[in-house]
């Protein structure tokens, strides 16, 4: 689809946005279900091997073969986003509930704003700075003693979101393939063996339960592969090429709301007053940061490169 068609077809934009909102928000629930019977890192490895193979077979047809330089860049981005980022989320959900994990992951735009400021000279407006303060205040409410979050799991999620933000910034200028779906498939294929090695080192091979092959976890796993990784990302890739980035980025503050709601409905995850207040603060912070970003300092034309945004496979 072209940008002109997207502008002529608001329903297409609405459907794609709704897909990203619901699908990526619901993957936290699916990960929580699989985590009960399947080792998180090995599960993620198999998930990305299947999804990456299917996506590569579909997206890479008829185009030039990726170069070694592109594979190397995809490996770096895949390690940052899918090994540390997604793998960390899967592991953390073995210790905290899905809604709480989604709220903590929502602080990723906070790291993005800070890294943009430090490494790219992108200054935040007063609105964005206020968002940073509110966001970290909300995170503090969750991780303080009695706040409801496992401190170590929260620390892991802080690392995963920082890694995701750094990987996303690198992906903007990395020598990735120009076709976003091919790039995403390569990142999944590169991350899969890294996740497998991490899982084996962590002793996960002995942690597979017999119940892992029952209907519910298998359906959740299939959902992650087919809906979360393929349908969700396809919708996102179309949006990022046809709709303003400020509109697409709204998924960052809708996904936690979807995840908390689904966790409460299907897994009976409690929603206390602290979680509600902290969650509202984090979502408000993301809104302020997304709306409060200002343009970066001018750069020489030779340094301006079109980075492929296809690396942002959130779930």
Image (cartoon, rainbow, N blue to C red):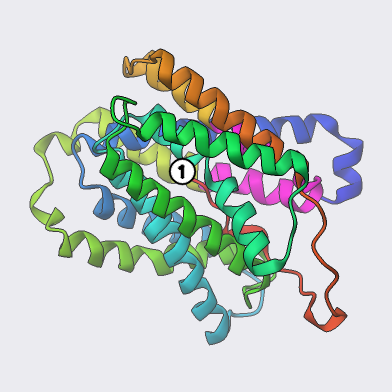
Q: Residue at x 42, y 21 (%)?
A: 275
Which secondary structure type mostly characterizes the magenta part of the structure? Answer: helix
Q: Residue at x 24, y 36 (%)?
A: 95
Residue sitting nearer the eye, 51 or 240: 240
Report the front residue among 291 and 203: 291
Instruction: Please provide percent x and percent y for residue 112.
Output: 60, 54
Residue 10 in view in this figure:
yes
Rendered view: 241 above or below 22: below
Q: Residue at x 81, y 46 (%)?
A: 244
Q: Say left or right for 170 vs 270.
A: right
Q: Crowding at label 1, few (<14), some or many (≥20) Cα neighbours within 10 Å? A: some
| Residue numbers of the magenta segment | 230-255
Where does residue 197 sit, x and y in percent of width and height? 24, 67
Residue receiving disc 1: 226
Q: Is residue 45 left or right of residue 170?
A: left
| Quarter of the figure with residue 8 | top right
x, y percentage for residue 315?
A: 47, 45
């Amino acid at each position: 689809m072209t940008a002109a068609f997207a502008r002529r077809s608001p329903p297409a934009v609405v459907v794609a946005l709704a897909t990203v909102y619901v699908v990526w928000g619901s993957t936290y629930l699916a990960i929580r279900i699989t985590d009960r019977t399947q080792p998180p890192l090995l599960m993620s490895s198999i998930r990305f091997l299947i999804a990456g193979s299917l996506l590569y077979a579909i997206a890479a047809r008829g185009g030039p073969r990726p170069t070694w330089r592109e594979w190397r860049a995809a490996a770096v981005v895949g390690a940052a986003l899918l090994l540390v980022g997604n793998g960390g989320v899967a592991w953390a959900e073995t210790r905290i509930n899905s809604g709480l994990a989604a709220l903590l992951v929502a602080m990723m735009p906070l790291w993005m704003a800070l890294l943009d400021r430090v490494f790219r000279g992108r200054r935040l407006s007063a609105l964005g700075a206020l968002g940073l303060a509110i966001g970290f205040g909300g995170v503090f409410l969750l991780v303080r003693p009695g706040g409801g979050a496992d401190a170590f799991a929260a620390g892991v999620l802080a690392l995963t979101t920082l890694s995701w933000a750094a990987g996303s910034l690198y992906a903007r200028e990395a020598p990735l393939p120009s076709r976003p779906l091919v790039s995403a498939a390569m990142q999944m294929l590169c991350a899969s063996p890294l996740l497998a090695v991490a899982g084996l080192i962590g002793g996960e091979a002995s942690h597979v339960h017999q119940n892992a092959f029952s209907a519910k976890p298998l359906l959740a796993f299939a959902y992650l592969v087919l809906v979360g990784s393929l349908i969700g990302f396809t919708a996102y890739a179309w949006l990022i090429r046809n709709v303003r980035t400020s509109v697409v980025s709204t998924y960052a503050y809708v996904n936690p709301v979807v995840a908390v709601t689904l966790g409460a409905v299907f897994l009976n995850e409690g929603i206390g007053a602290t979680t509600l207040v902290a969650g509202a603060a984090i979502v408000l912070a993301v809104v302020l940061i997304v709306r409060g970003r200002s343009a970066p300092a001018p750069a020489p034309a030779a340094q301006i490169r079109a980075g492929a945004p296809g690396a942002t496979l959130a779930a």
